[in-house]
Image (tube, rainbow, N blue to C red):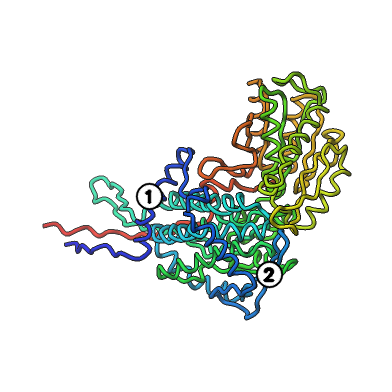
Amino acid sequence: MTTQTAPVHTPSSELFERHRDVLDGALAAITSRGWFTAYPENAKAYGEDAGPAGKRAFEELRGAQFAIGQPTTGSWIGAERSPYGFDLGITYPQLDVDAALTRATEVLPAWRDAGAEARTGVLLEALHQINARSHELAHAVMHTTGQAFPMAFQAGGPHAQERALEALAYAYQAMSAVPAEAIWEKPQGKRPPLRMRKQFTVAPRGVGLVIGCSTVPTWNSYPGLFASLATGNPVVVKPSAGAVLPLAITVAILRDALEAAGFSGDLVTLAVEEAGGTIAADLAVRPEIRIIDYTGSSTFGDWLEREAKQAVVFTEKAGVNTVVIDSTDDYKGVLQNLAFTLSLYSGQMCTTTQNVYVPRDGIDTDMGRKSFEEVGADLAGAVDGFLSDPARAAGVLGAIVNDDIVARTDAAGELGDVLLATKALEHPEFPDATMRSPAIVAVAGTDADATQTEHFGPIALVVPTDGTAASLEQLERGALAHGAMTAGVYSTSEDVLQAARQAALTGGVALSENLTGGVFVNQSAAYSDFHGTGLNPAANASLSDAAFVAPRFHVVQSRRHIAEEATA
């Protein structure tokens, strides 16, 4: 006789049911690759009081200690300065690394044993709470990264949250493919069959380390953070020293959500350090750290891949993104699209175009034949005209995040013939903001040293080639040699577009074709676009697919014989 027991309802299982529709929508979207959104990108959708409340919440954080109830040394750290010209004055508790890792190891079993649905439910609730504070997060992102408010709200808020939900959906899908239990029965002819009961448990790898960047801290950190937590791994979040606040708010919300559901907040901790510190490198080689998610320079990314042998490492590093112009039936649309692409967030994105390849004998357009020199001059004019309105310029460019980018941009004229000189602009609301318009430079040719290096920031190079075939060869070879996250092509020829697809496939880079409307090469849509491929040096894995999640857990089984049931 089998005794039936009623299902046990826990806070986390109730959370899963509460947010099930959101998860189901994301699961459908990652299968269809169609448009889906769970979190509105329009700031007005959050109510007329949300904007002022979010700004007040941000202002209340300034000049104060940001308390997080995690293991600490007792010291407080923080020296963030807004690229718009003022100090934030916020300090954060210095993490006691040894105690935090010990604690993470202690609380892992309860989080693991809760199961996929419980973990997913808690994280869906945390995302719901994060989304409710999108305006506050937007100000935090704006005043640590220099993003203009519209981008800080969208990319730093709802778009980053969609990336987290996408990772959650992949994690839940992968874990759900593993049954909790199975009855195995093997026929034995005339003898009774062999029967076994097998149980399968999703087992996390261990503690994860998320190393954030200074330019897009939430958008780039959320996928790894939520993928690791969903699969049962505690996480240490190490923000860039200049962009702590957005991830500190995130960690605080996660800790509160975990504790409200009956789990330890120490499943997520924040590791803050002064600029130039070594805590990321020190943590990366600790035996407790089994997963690393990193965005930043190739130098440190390569070091992580080489030295953190005990961990599975996901990196997004530097790359040289390209656009090939062959021909077009919308010349004005090409120029307008590229002008926005080159201006958005002052080129401080891993997806922004740098090298624009144009045949030296010119291109065919709906406005007649355009020489190489005309294309370069017209592109410079389009950017200059696009940024001629101060309010628009401020809303698109944002501010420069650090002095290295300022120096690099100011020296761009040394790379070749200046088509558009960078200018220091004044922000209409923040007079102390550091703003630079893009520099556009024509270089000697594809062999110029400038084309072989990433010039991170508002710098674009117009490069002459011996023809479109040579341009596509540079797209392919450049991606393989130096890495690339995006590539673009403009052509009226289907043969050229097909050749471009082949070059992008070989180079392992996402390709955009003939973008002249409201989509830009440096934008990536959650659930639909695959961000990174893992096929060139810019990223060692696709950062938006099932393979991004799968290495974060294993399956451990137990089995035993089932005794023959007594027969009457």
> Mark 2, residues whose alpha carbon is within 10 Å: few (<14), some, or many (≥20)?
many
| Amino acid at the residue labelled 1 | Asp
Residue at image position (23%, 46%) is 190
Picture coordinates of residue 391, whole percent (x, y): 68, 47
Along the horizontal axis of the image, is 158 left or right of 119?
Answer: right
Residue 556 located left or right of residue 225: left
Give me the disc on residue 21. Answer: 1
Q: Quick check: can you spot residue 350?
A: no
Viewer-nearest residue: 257 or 330: 330
Instruction: Name the kind of residue labelled 2 in the image.
Output: Glu
Disc assigned to residue 273: 2
Residue 298 x/y as whole percent: 73, 52
User: In this view of the protein, which residue sits in the foreground, 451 or 283?
Assistant: 451
Looking at the rendering, in which quadrant would you find the C terminus? bottom left
For the residues bearing labels 1 and 2, Cβ distance under 8 angstroms: no
Q: Residue at x 39, y 47 (%)?
A: 24
| Residue drawn where x is 80% and y is 50% of the image | 424
- Visible residue check, residue 517: yes
* SS type, badge 1: helix
Q: Quadrant of residue 85?
A: bottom right
Percent from the top left, x then y, of residue 544?
55, 46
* Relative horizontal placement of residue 451, taking residue 217 as reference (left or right): right
SS of the residue at dot 2? loop
- Residue shown at 86%/42% (left/top)? 415
Checking the image for residue 275, the label placed there is none
**Viewer-nearest residue: 149 or 411:** 149
Cα gap from disc 1 to disc 2, whole angstroms: 39 Å
The relative height of residue 126 versus residue 424 in the rendered view (above or below) is below
For marks 1 and 2 on the same chain, the one whose residue lies earlier in the sequence? 1
In this image, 1 relative to 238: left or right? Answer: left
Residue 64 vertical placement versus 34 (above, below): below
